[in-house]
Amino acid sequence: MDRFGEMHIFVRIVERRSFTKAATDLMIPRATVTNAIQRLEERLGTRLLERTTRQVKPTLDGEAYYQRCRRILFDLEDADGLFRQTMPKGLLRVNLQGTLARKFIIPALPGFMSAYPELTLLIADSDRYVDLVQEGYDCVVRSGELSDSTMIVRRLTLLPTVTLASPDYFGKIGIPETLDDLTTQNHQAVGYLSGANDRPVPLDFTVGGVLRQVMLPASVSVTGADLYMAAGLAGLGLIQVPRYRVIEDLRAGALVEILPEYPPEPMPVSVLYPQNRQLSPRVRAFADWLTALFRTLHFGS
């Protein structure tokens, strides 16, 4: 194994905090990972990693070496792609928002795989905050406003969004005709906890072109989009979701839209990836494909 191979293994261990996870990501035996680090530490004459029963973390020397290795490896990968004009290849680990993945991304995926036959995809789905580096993902697709300034964010589309609840819910509390009715009629929302700090998200309304946020009490709070929808259908409170998700429920009368004259702001959909991976051919190919795909999609108004 050459020095670049050892650097690649070392970088993956630091990012994943695990010899076993690094070996799985790189699709090599764990023994190969262990032997590579032993050779690397012997050659450099310093200890790079601290090992405990729970995790692996870099020493001070290891952290400094990791930063240099990361820059070298990404420069090397970018140079290969620029001058050799080779097709992206290898493993691409992505984390997708489940509903968008099932409805739009996965059905179109055969076209991407045909265009890039040397790529292998590992796909996970989640609504929660994901630490891309720590968890080993190359990029994620998320809905909603994003606050992680350490990521490169590429906007894919804006989803028209509506406010609704079930007929059973409105039968108990009444249908609000104005924004003030939301408080005077004692309405409740289904709480949606979003982001790394799990803060509840207020309801958004556009009044005369100006955003107005309303925080209603919530007896039930959830952390995922599917649970949020299910709670709304069960009559547990008001919800705000992209219109494409509820077209059939509106037609069937399972949900009722309210206050259409004060629509929520459209929900952004974005692909995110670490700044140090913005030039990775694998990530660039997938992000470019997603951008082109979402230009062809229609989400209603």
Image (cartoon, rainbow, N blue to C red):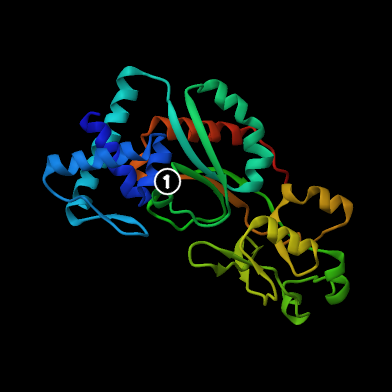
- The percent position of residue 296, horizontal first and vertical second, equals 64, 32
Is disc 1 placed on a helix, strand or loop? loop
Give residue 50's quadrant in the image: bottom left
Residue at 49% in and 33% down: 286
Q: Is residue 29 left or right of residue 70?
A: right
The tally of labels here is 1
Identify which residue, 53 or 116, lies in the foreground.
Answer: 53
Q: Residue furthest front?
A: 31
Query: Is the N terminus in the top left, top right, bottom left or bottom right quadrant?
Result: top left
Residue at 83% in and 53% down: 250
Give residue 258's quadrant in the image: bottom right
Q: Residues within 10 Å of mark 1 (few under 14, many from 20)?
A: many
Q: Is residue 182 left or right of residue 282?
A: right
- The percent position of residue 68, horizontal first and vertical second, equals 21, 43
* Residue 258 can be seen, yes or no: no
Identify which residue, 111 or 202, lies in the foreground.
Answer: 111
Give residue 30's quadrant in the image: top left
Residue type at the position of mark 1: Gly
Which residue was labeled with disc 1?
A: 136
* Residue 140 can be seen, yes or no: yes
- The percent position of residue 6, horizontal first and vertical second, equals 25, 36
Residue 191 lies, with reference to residue 245, above or below; the image says: below
Residue at 48% in and 39% down: 93
Identify which residue, 19 or 294, lies in the foreground.
Answer: 19
Q: Is residue 201 left or right of residue 72?
A: right
